Every structure is written in structure tokens, then in C-alpha cells.
Image: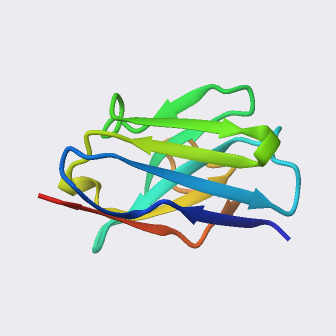
Amino acid sequence: QVQLVESGGGLVQAGGSLRLSCAASGRTFSTKSMGWFRQAPGKEREFVAAIGWLGDEYYADSVKGRFTISRDNAKNTVYLQMDSLKPEDTAVYFCTVNPVVRGKAADYWGQGTQVTVSA
């Protein structure tokens, strides 16, 4: 059974940074793409970033230049470094396996971790 466990969310002031982690278990993910989505209150879930199994990276325009996705295949873990955070980045962030880049679907989802950015 696939499990994705996110951590690293929290409360931060605008301009600050957070690093999200997602530990995957249940199968080998080294040949799978992984990524992050987010959902703010009252809004649709949206794509944030993805990383292919060869390390190719994809970002939503809203986070490009501020967020960096990376992975450690030996640890089955994917990271999202979030810098220059803005209040509009406030959302629940979900880790995924095989995300549709700039879409809304993925094969597996974590439970999510809350990120709150205060003005």
C-alpha cells in the first residue's frame, strides 16, 4: 500500500521560507515522477511543482523562481523549498506520485500539510 507522509508545514511571515518533505513508502518511487499540489480555502486544488525521475523540474507560474522541488531517491523522499513566501501561498500542500503537470490529477496523494503565511 502506497503511503505519502508530508511534514514541514507551519506558520511563517511573508518573505520567509519553509521546506516541505514527503516520505513515500509502499513501493519504489525512483522511476516515478513526484510533485506537489495545494488547495486554499474556497479554491480549487492547483498544481505547484513536479519532478521527473530523471530530475526534470516543472513549476506553476505563480511559484516559479521562489519554490524549488528536489528528490532523494535513496530515501524515497521529495522536498519543496519555499522561499519569499506570500500570503497567497497559504494552503494545504499535498504530495503526489505521477502528477499531471499543470493539471489536477495524480495517482497517489498524501494527507496534506498546512502552510500559513501571515502578512
Q: Nearer the viewer, residue 72 or 89?
A: 72
Q: Quadrant of residue 87?
A: bottom left
- 116 relative to 53, above or below: below
Residue at horizontal 70%, vertical 41%? 33
Question: In the image, residue 62 lies at what x, y percent?
Answer: 30, 40
Residue under the point 29% across and 73% down: 41
Horizontal and vertical percent position of residue 10: 37, 65
* Scheme by which the image is coloured: rainbow
Q: Quadrant of residue 66?
A: top left
List x then y, in percent, for residue 14.
Answer: 18, 51
Report the front residue among 13 and 63: 13
Which quadrant of the figure contains the C terminus? bottom left
Is residue 106 in view from this perspective?
no
The picture places residue 60, in percent across and down from the top left corner, at: 40, 39
Tell me: residue 109, above or below residue 31.
below
Quarter of the image holding residue 2?
bottom right
Question: Going by the image, does 5 lie left or right of 91?
Answer: right
The residue closer to the viewer here, 102 or 51, is 51
Q: Identify which residue is drawn at 28% across, 74% down.
A: 42
| Visible residue check, residue 22 | yes
Whether 87 is drawn above or below 11: the answer is above
